[in-house]
Amino acid sequence: MKFKISLVEVKSAQLFFILLFPLFFIYQAIMSLGYIPPFLGAYFGLVSLIILPFVLVSYFYVFFKKPISWLEKVFLIYVAYSVFITLFNFSFADLNEYDYDMLYWSISSVIFIFICFFIGKNVEVTNAFYAVCLLLFFLSVLLVFLNVGERGIFYLKSDSVNDSLTVTYQGFARSLLMMSLYCVAFCNNRIYKLGLFALATIALFFNGARTEFIVFTVSFLSVYLLSQHSFKLLFLMVFSAIFLMYFGEQIYEMLPDNRMKSIFNIFSTTSANSRSEYFNSALTTISNSPLFGDYGSYLNEYGQGGFSHNVFSAWVNLGLLGFILYLSIITSIIFKVFKDIGVPISNKVFTFKAMLAISVITMVLFSKDYSYMLFGFMVGVFCNNKINKEVL
């Protein structure tokens, strides 16, 4: 009976991964291009609500029968505390439009994080699952390359026949990043692995989301360099540095004229200036109310998207306790990664976990807010203790 329950969790986690990442990307793309009607709306929210009952029943049925790790306990406390803070603040709010928007945003974020956690905790690596993910990855990359628009990036929202339902490049980038991490990390052949890395990097570049492009590139190179101990690699690094020093300007001029060029001058962009303003506002809020923060204090001035795009967003909305819980989870995962540094890159499980941790932690520390759903997936992966061959 226990084996059957475990098998159901694994298979459902594989299915949910495919539904929420590769198929989300493909549905959004072909719906935006007008090839299919938007019969699932914007897709992600509706599909998440459909699978949520199964996730809750499946998780808590097993929850009371098996011991869980310290990391999982802290994560569950954090999730429960987030829900409590949301409902507590809503119950004392004036119930204007912003309050309802904040309630919807907060609860949906918790749902997405928990579903992603369930997937990460139970997903298992099999040849069939990898083959499906790889096929869908190639299809997604093809959709990117075939639909690079006038802006020089894969931005379907501007020309979409269903623009109100089409996600921005960041929504596409989230799925493309997850597919890229998975397909690259679990590739057996080193040459093919480097080829997939190059393909994914180019696709993320034309996708136009700078953060995902940077963290994917940095995460792979970091894990690859840390796992190698050779003079050839050192020589290659020195040669590359010299090459870029002499030909960097020419390479820059050869790049497509799109928003990705601003990576070389990232702190002068309009986005960076806005985020700096949001961050300063968050620091002011924290200094005025360091213990409890000020839930949704940015709404009246900046609107729903005016939160600090870094880890301090947790302090503003959840107070000092929520911030400490959040940092405790991040710190625990960092220690787990550092403990295994030096493991060969042929160890696919470590490669995936390390790349995922570097990518997600970098984003939530410096670029995303605390509700970023891949945070839940990362925690789930590090709570996944299955002993089958090639299990995360």
Image (spheres, rainbow, N blue to C red):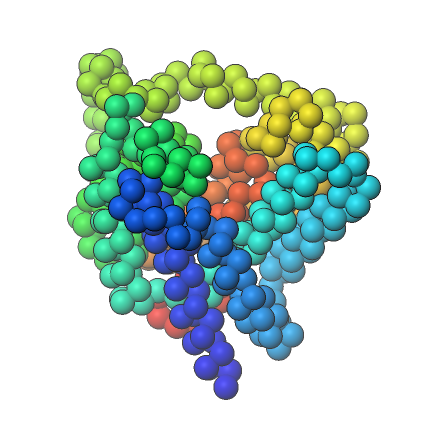
Residue at x 34%, y 53% (from the top left corner) = 23
The picture places residue 180, in percent across and down from the top left corner, at 32, 47
The picture places residue 221, in percent across and down from the top left corner, at 32, 39
Q: Quadrant of residue 255?
A: top left
Residue at x 19%, y 18% (from the top left corner) = 254
Residue 194 visible in the shown view: no
Numbered marks: total = 0
Position of 53 compared to 392: left or right? Answer: right
The picture places residue 169, in percent across and down from the top left corner, at 38, 34
Identify the image quadrant of the C terminus: bottom left
Give 84 or 156, whichever is nearer the viewer: 156
Vertical side of 322 occupied by 51: above or below: below
Q: Residue lying farthest right?
A: 92
Residue at x 33%, y 24% (from the top left corner) = 260
Q: Residue lying farthest left?
A: 191
Residue 318 visible in the shown view: yes
The picture places residue 358, in percent across and down from the top left corner, at 45, 42
Vertical side of 142 occupied by 387: above or below: below
Residue at x 65%, y 58% (from the top left corner) = 76
